[in-house]
Every structure is written in C-alpha cells, then in structure tokens.
Amino acid sequence: MIELAPSLLSCDFSKLKQEIHTIEDAGCDVLHLDIMDGHFVPNITFGPVVIKGIRKLTKLPLDVHLMIEHPENWITQFASAGADWISFHPEATDDAGKVIELIKKQGKLAAIALNPDTPLEVVEPYLQELDFVLVMTVNPGFGGQSFIPEPLEKVEILSQKGVRVEVDGGIKLENVERVVKAGAQIIVSGSGIFKTEDPGATVRKFKELTTKTQRHRVHKALY
C-alpha cells in the first residue's frame, strides 16, 4: 500500500486542527513535518513544542524531517514530543551512524534524507539499519518548489534493492503516478494538497491514483 503523508508546512496554521482533521478524515496515512533551523537550510519553521501540540490533535504517525545542523543534539527532544519517524540529512552531522542509533534507542523509525545532488553511495553503508530512505525531489528549505525528476533514478535503484522509499518535493496529482512507478512507497505532498481548493478531495484523489498505479505496477511486474 502506498502511504500518503501531507506536509503540514503548506497548511493554514491559523486553523491547524481543522486542516489536520480534514486530511485525516479523507484517508491520509501519515503527517509530514518539516523542521528547519535557519542554518542547514535558509528558513526557520518550528520545533518540538509545536510537534507536541500536533501530537495531541491526531493519532496518525508523525513523520519528522530534520533539516537542521547536528541532529544528534535533538533526537531525544523530538522523540519525546511525539515524533514517530525521524529523518535527517547526512551532510548535517559528522556521524550518521550515531544519529541512527539515537533514533532507534528512542523506539522510532529512522531514515536518511538524500538531497537531489547527494549521491546514493552516501546512504548505502546504512541501508541495513534504516527503516526507509527519504529521496528529495526538490532542494530542501522551502515549500512549493518545482519537482526535479532526476532523483527518481535513486528511487528505482533503492526500490529494486527492497528498500522502502519516501519521496518528497513538488509532488502533485499530475506527477504522482510517475513517482509511484519509480517505486516510491511513501508520498509527501504539501502545496499539492493544501493549496488546492479542497484538500480533503485532493487527498482522496491522491489515494485513488496511487493505489491504481501501484496495482498496475505490481501486475506488470508479475506478468
């Protein structure tokens, strides 16, 4: 099953509770939360206090994407705040193995995020320890960017190795089929959901399209 993870960075924070319940009722599977520190990326979003508040509003898994320097210093705080999945960028730390270990010690799912220009070789030493790999199809730091197709090659390679892959960046209804065909199992979409006229209806369309595409992909692989 393809899991859909709407990115709350693009939602209307003045009605956060309503936005979460709208997409939750429409059938999304996960909530994606982009954490930016103004150092690793040139933008600032929110931290553990906001995660703690969101945790009270939903039982859905919280997928926390750390775009911050020295993520090892923050794993315990985000885990305690309610994060269920934690991904980080290998460029942000001197010891990716240590960060993965810290995430696992908190009982959370661990992932490494790969920027569009980050070679796949960077993550290969850790594949046995990771629960999934996050492949970025935009450069991290801002929502609403245009989709970069080249990283889908990484998705295909990882998928062929049996690795669970999440894809994030510029994904909308018009290109999500391409992402699923490449082998993605978790789809992140921010503006592609929250900037549409009816986010709930868009979630349902995403689920319909991804399910249909996945079935076709499996059928094609079998025959």
Image (cartoon, rainbow, N blue to C red):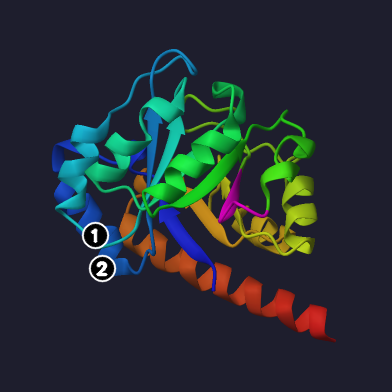
Q: Is residue 62 visible?
A: yes
Relative to 61, residue 35 above or below:
above
Q: Which residue does the image show at 65% across and 79% down from the upper left?
A: 215
| Along the viewing direction, whichever of 64 and 212 lies nearer the viewer | 64
x and y percent of residue 188 in the render?
49, 50
The type of residue carrying mark 1 is Thr
Q: Is residue 88 left or right of residue 219?
A: left
Relative to 38, residue 180 above or below:
below
Residue linked to disc 2? 25
Farthest-out residue, right: 223
Q: Which residues are magenta?
A: 128-134
Q: Which residue does the image show at 73% across and 74% down from the upper left?
A: 217
Q: Which residue does the image show at 37% across and 36% down from the upper left?
A: 75
x and y percent of residue 138 in the render?
60, 33
The stretch drawn in magenta includes residue 219: no
Asked where in the image residue 78 lies, by quadrant, the reply is top left
x and y percent of residue 122 in the render?
73, 35
Quadrant showing the N terminus: bottom right
Residues at marks 1 and 2, CA–CA distance in whole angstroms: 5 Å
Circles 1 and 2, Cβ within 8 Å, touching? The answer is yes
Q: Callout 1: 10 Å neighbours few (<14), some, many (20+)?
A: some
Relative to 97, residue 184 above or below:
below
Q: Callout 2: 10 Å neighbours few (<14), some, many (20+)?
A: few
x and y percent of residue 148 in the render?
68, 36
| Along the viewing direction, whichever of 10 and 129 lies nearer the viewer | 129
Q: Is residue 9 left or right of residue 154?
A: left
The label number, if any, that marks residue 31 in the structure image: none
The stretch drawn in magenta includes residue 132: yes
The type of residue carrying mark 2 is Asp
Asked where in the image residue 59 lies, by quadrant, the reply is bottom left
The label number, if any, that marks residue 22 in the structure image: 1
